[in-house]
Image: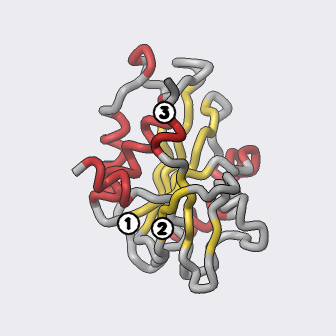
Amino acid sequence: MIRELILMNRSYRRFYQEVVVEYDTLKELVDLARQSASAANLQPLRYILSCDPKKNALIFSHLAWAAYLKDWPGPSEGERPSAYIIILEDTQIGHPLRCDHGIAAQSILLGATEKGLGGCILGGIKRQGLRQALDIPQRYEILLVLALGKPKETVVLETVGNDGDIKYWRDSKGIHHVPKRALDDIIVG
């Protein structure tokens, strides 16, 4: 079961924007992160949840999408996420953060996958602009934004070719291809 969830959990960047993700669903997903491991059990993460179209549009305007797809500015209207979870670090609890936000993001996305949703972890964030737009206090460091919704694209895993190129790409039909290194290539010793 966990293998299936992991293989289905891809970075989706286009969504059925009209499919609503309820606030209670976002809370359930954050509860998975809350119950996940935390370095030294400090639990310094905090979350901003959004499933409101106006707030979503505000968040969207502060994100950068798919660095390898140079000619693609991000999802167009109608294909944008219907929800976001912004992961913050409360710097008054634990700083510098180690791995908590990665664990939390993966827990949230696996939970979303189990619910038939998909998402994308975004690190390309115009942090100062987002902080001002959402009035986020300075004590909270903006770490990641998770875009969530009903996926509108197909993502295919394939093995990295002989050229070693790991850049994802889209074909003429809009299918998103993601090269992954072979298992034997990543095991050392």
Q: Are marks 2 and 1 in contact (CB under 8 Å)?
A: no
Instruction: Give the label, 1 or 3, closer to the camera.
Output: 3
Instruction: Give the label, 2 or 3, closer to the camera.
Output: 3
- First-in-chain label (2 vs 3): 2
For label 1, the SS is loop
Instruction: Please give left or right for residue 41 compared with residue 171 in the image.
Output: left
Circle 2 packing at 10 Å, graded few (<14), some (14-19), many (20+), is some
- The residue tagged 2 is 156
For label 3, the SS is loop
Q: Nearer the viewer, residue 75 or 177?
A: 177
Residue plotted at (22% across, 51% down)? 1
Q: Amino acid at mark 3?
A: Ile
Residue 21: mark? 1
- Distance from disc 2 to disc 1, alpha carbons, whole Å, reads 24 Å
Residue 87: mark? none
Residue plotted at (65% across, 46% down)? 135
Instruction: Give the label, 2 or 1, closer to the camera.
Output: 2
Circle 1 packing at 10 Å, graded few (<14), some (14-19), many (20+), is many
Tell me if residue 160 comes above or below residue 56 in the rendering: above
Instruction: Please give left or right for residue 135 compared with residue 145 in the image.
Output: right
Instruction: Please give left or right for residue 132 compared with residue 148 in the image.
Output: right
- Distance from disc 1 to disc 3, alpha carbons, whole Å, reads 39 Å
Q: Residue furthest top?
A: 40
Write down the quadrant of residue 73 in the picture: bottom right
Look at the image and tell me whether residue 76 can be seen: yes
Q: Position of residue 114 (x, y in %)?
A: 28, 57
- First-in-chain label (2 vs 1): 1
Q: Are marks 1 and 3 in contact (CB under 8 Å)?
A: no
- The residue tagged 3 is 187
